Amino acid sequence: MLEIITIQEQVEEKENFFADYVKNYGFLFIIMAITVSATYPSTDTTAGEKERGTLETLLTFPIKAKDIIIGKFLGVSISSIITGMISLVLSIAALAIAQDKFTIYEGMNIMYEPIALVFAVTVIIAYSFFISGLCIAIASTAKTFKEAQSALTPLTFISFFPGMIAFMTDIASSPILSIVPFLNYTMLFTDMIKGKIDYLNIALMLLSTIVYITIVLKIIIKQYKSENILFSK
């Protein structure tokens, strides 16, 4: 008579929004870290050189302007890639420690899957080249170091908020969105952590990134051929 009700606990494994939230935001902060790391060397190698007066000396050397630009671009890109890789390692370590130390993550898998890690490395490299070229192009138009910093500050928010909004509103990825800068990287990574792999969207993301980098480099070369841009005070 005292045990007329039987309680049975059954746990069903389903898609966990909170686990995806943690992993996705970890990746968003990696993107933001890459953006921040690209702004400072871009500013120093462009507006900083103009402000110090060393750019004129550099251009007197028997080096083509194109080679100078490629050198600056690769230098900033390598710095950004290193920052992205270090951020990824720290993110993995933080998630591993958090899963073992905090009971709130008990029963949840907040670690990145191997396929997500491979894609994350690919995005880090592609995004580093893209954001480095964009930062150099913007900073080259500035007259002073501070002016370049002010012009590049919005990029930090632009790199973070589109992906955050897309994740929170659960916007589905598509071929069109896969070519939208900033948004495409986060959306495709969100698909990865959910186990959705669309090779067409990934290919479009990589192809569009190459196109954007090419356009940005042409803009930078055009800027460096203009004396009004180089020596304006």
Image (cartoon, rainbow, N blue to C red):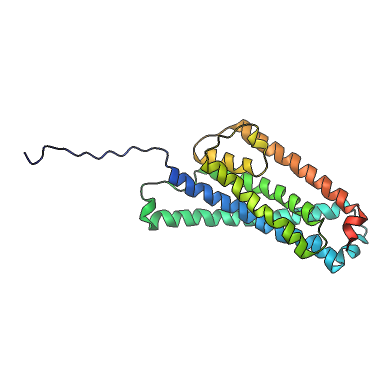
Residue at the image position 43 percent from the left and 56 percent from the top: 98
Left or right: 89 as drawn, with respect to 60: left
**In this picture, residue 67 sits left or right of residue 151:** right
Residue at 70% from the left image edge and 50% from the top image edge: 131
Q: Is residue 7 above or below residue 85?
A: above
Foreground pick, 57 / 177: 177
Residue 188 placement (x, y as % from top left): 58, 39
Measuring from the top left, give residue 95's x and y in whole percent.
Answer: 47, 54
Task: From the top left corner, tell me how far across and down residue 186 is, in percent.
Answer: 59, 43
> In what quadrant of the picture does the C terminus appear?
bottom right
Specify whether residue 41 is in view: no
* On screen, residue 57 above or below 185: below
Residue 67 visible within the image: yes
Quadrant of residue 58 in the image?
A: bottom right
Question: What's the residue at 71%, 47% (across, down)?
Answer: 130
Place of residue 119 in the rendered image (x, y in percent of width and height, measured from the top left): 58, 42
**Location of the N terminus (image quadrant):** top left
Residue shown at the point (62%, 54%) measured from the top left:
32
Residue lying at the far left in this picture: please name it: 1
